[in-house]
Image (cartoon, grey):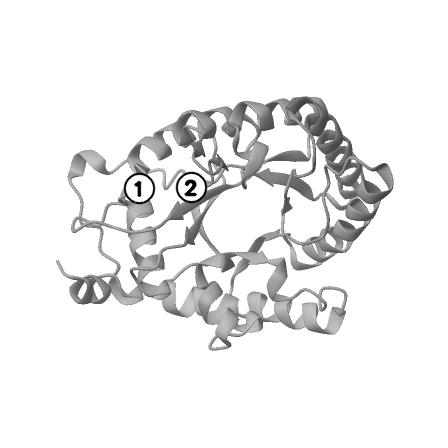
Amino acid sequence: MDRRDFVKKTSIAGLGIIAAPSLITSCSSGPWFEISLAEWSLHKALNKGSLQHLSFPEKAKREFGITAVEYVSTFFKGLVEDRNYVGELKKSADYHGVKSVLIMVDGEGSLGAGDEKERIIAVNNHKKWVEAAKFLGCHSIRVNARGPGGPEELAKTAAAGLRSLSEFAQPYDIGVIVENHGGLSSNGAWLAGVMKEVDLPNCGTLPDFGNFRIAEGEEYDRYLGTKELMPFAKGVSAKSYDFDSDGLETTIDFEKMLKIVKKSGYRGYIGIEYEGSNLPEDEGILYTKRLLKMYQ
C-alpha cells in the first residue's frame, strides 16, 4: 500500500485497521486507552501560519477524527492571560466536542534552578499556565525538570521547584507532570527518583516514547525508561518519526512500548506526537493514529 492509498484508506469516513488478528488487543468492553493529538505534531503548519492556534481543536476533529488535544504553550505565549483569547479557544474546543487534555509548557524558566530566587521566578511563571489549564478543562500542565548541577544536586533543586508548583496547583485540581525531555530528565531512574522525592499525588510524569537522549552520543534505553516512568504517569506521548511499508514505526517498537504501558495499568490518554520529516504532518498523524488503533 503506497502513501496515497494509505491516506484514502484512513480518511475519517472509514478509518480501517489493517493488521494481523494477533496484533489486535481491543475487546468487547472497549479500548483500554483514548487517543489525543499533541499540537507539536503540527508545529510546521503553525510556525508558517497555515494553521492558527485557535483552529487546532477543529482541525483535530474534522481532519483526523480525534476528539482530545494537547496544547503547546509557545503557540499562545503572551496570550495565555488574555481571557478573551483563551475563552475563544475553549469555545472552539467545546463547539467541536473536543476535550482539552493538557498544556505542554516551555520557556518559563528552570524549575530546577540552583539559585532559589531564580527557581521561585520559574515557579511563578508557570502559575498562569495552571490557571489556564483549569479554565480550559485540562487535567495537567507538562513541565521540564531542568537546571544546573549533577544528578544529586539537580534532583534536590528540581524536586523543590516541582513541589512548590504542585502545591500551588493542588487547589485547582491540576497535575504537574514532567516529560523525559533531554538531559537528566531522559534518565528514567533519575526522574522516577525525583517523583519519589516530591511525593505529591498531583505531581507525575509524561513518558515520551522518543525523548531518551541524555547528551550527544548518550541514549537511555527507551523501553526501560518508559517502564520506570509509568508508575507515575498521568499522560503518555506516542512520539513517531517514520514508517515502513507495513505502517510500523521504524525507530520505536510500538507493540513493545504499548505492552509496557498497558502492563502498568495506565488507562488515560495516549497523545500522538509526530515529529518526522519524511511525511507531511497530516499524513504522519494519520499513520500514528492507525498504529495506535492496532493495539487499542
| 90 or 150, nearer to the observer | 150
Q: Quadrant of residue 152?
A: top right
Can you give x and y, in whole percent of width and height, for residue 61 in the image? 43, 65
Q: Which mark is residue 210?
A: 2
Q: Residue 146: horizontal and vertical position, in percent?
A: 66, 39
Q: Amino acid at mark 1?
A: Thr
Three-letter amino acid code at the position of disc 2: Gly
- Crowding at label 2, few (<14), some or many (≥20) Cα neighbours within 10 Å? many
Q: Residue at x 18, y 49 (%)?
A: 18
User: Does the rendering let one see residue 265?
Assistant: no
Task: Name the residue at 46% across, 77% down.
Answer: 50
Is residue 53 toward the left or the right of residue 143 in the image? left
Residue 128, quarter of picture:
bottom right
Sequence-wise, which precedes: disc 2 or disc 1?
2
In depth, the one of 43 and 91 nearer the eye is 43
Q: Are marks 2 and 1 in contact (CB under 8 Å)?
A: yes
Residue at the spot x=49%, y=74% of the render? 48
Q: Residue furthest left?
A: 1
Provide the residue designation for mark 1: 251
Label 2, secondary structure: give it: loop
Q: 10 Å neighbourhood of mark 1: few (<14), some, or many (≥20)?
A: some
User: Does 76 sit above or below residue 272?
Assistant: below
Q: Position of residue 127 (x, y in %)?
A: 78, 50
